[in-house]
Image (cartoon, rainbow, N blue to C red):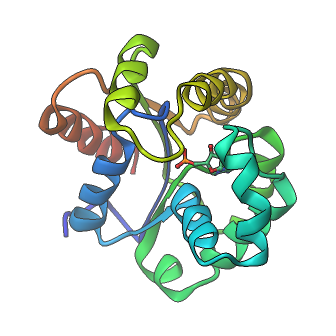
Amino acid sequence: MSGIGEGPLRLVIFGRQGAGKGTQCARLVEEFGVAHISTGDMLRAAVAAETDMGLKAKAVMSSGGLVGDDIMNGIVRDRLDETDANTGGFVLDGFPRTIPQAEALSIILGKRELHAAVNIDVPLEEVTARMKARGREDDTEEGIARRLELYEQETQPVLEWFSARNRLITVDGFSTEDIVWDRLVSAIKAAA
Ligand code: AMP
């Protein structure tokens, strides 16, 4: 594990769908021992397990819409209460997506201060091409367009919310995985 100062690393990671967040998160887990908390992965697992929540989320997800804030805040609060996230830190991926979620997160975290909210920035045309190429089940053309549109509408203000609190770091993500990783680590170390 690399030194990043005192205590466990606590990050939020942003990036348009297709920006390479998943890959970079796996490397963050490896390098810093954090828990990767992806709300998209948690919801997909709930859909696969056909839990009540999964059944409710399924239609919203396949249309590219957003699951309600109350459900999401509850999922994240419970997950952040678990031991691994408390002792080893975390990288939160896919949350917050709205201002009410950002506000809920600061209440959930309380004294566990975030080191940074990192935005992996990749141009819109590039992520659209990448998502069409990866062909996941919820990657219908309509779904892709709607999610990217929602990202601009709902998540851009969340980036501004973190920026106004001096927590936002933007990393240029339009490069190879290794170069983006180096930029990411430098940015995190500078912030921590
Ligand atoms: P993702 O893998 O992060 O793109 O998430 C897949 C889908 O899960 C999204 O398109 C949303 O429908 C839903 N989802 C994931 N995270 C959230 C969130 N924080 N708020 C609302 N919906 C979410």
Left or right: where 103 falls relative to 2 = right
Left or right: where 107 falls relative to 36 = right
Left or right: where 12 falls relative to 29 = right
Give the quarter of the image for residue 82. Answer: bottom right
* Residue lying at 59% horizontally and 59% vertically, measured from the top left: 39
Quadrant of the image for the N terminus?
bottom left
Residue nearest the viewer, comparing 85 with 41: 41
Give the quarter of the image for residue 146. Answer: top right
State the image coordinates of residue 139 (x, y, percent, origin top left).
50, 37
State the image coordinates of residue 65 (x, y, percent, origin top left).
73, 39
The answer to whether residue 107 shows anywhere in this view is no
Residue nearest the viewer, comparing 90 with 142: 142
Residue nearest the viewer, comparing 129 with 123: 129
Number of marks:
0
Say if 191 sits above or below 55 in the image: above
State the image coordinates of residue 125 (x, y, percent, origin top left).
41, 11
* Residue lying at 21% horizontally and 63% vertically, measured from the top left: 31
State the image coordinates of residue 36 (x, y, percent, origin top left).
43, 65
* Residue lying at 63% horizontally and 67% vertically, measured from the top left: 47
Say if 82 sits above or below 57 in the image: below
The answer to whether residue 42 shows anywhere in this view is yes
Say if 136 sits above or below 163 in the image: below
* Residue lying at 37% horizontally and 69% vertically, measured from the top left: 34
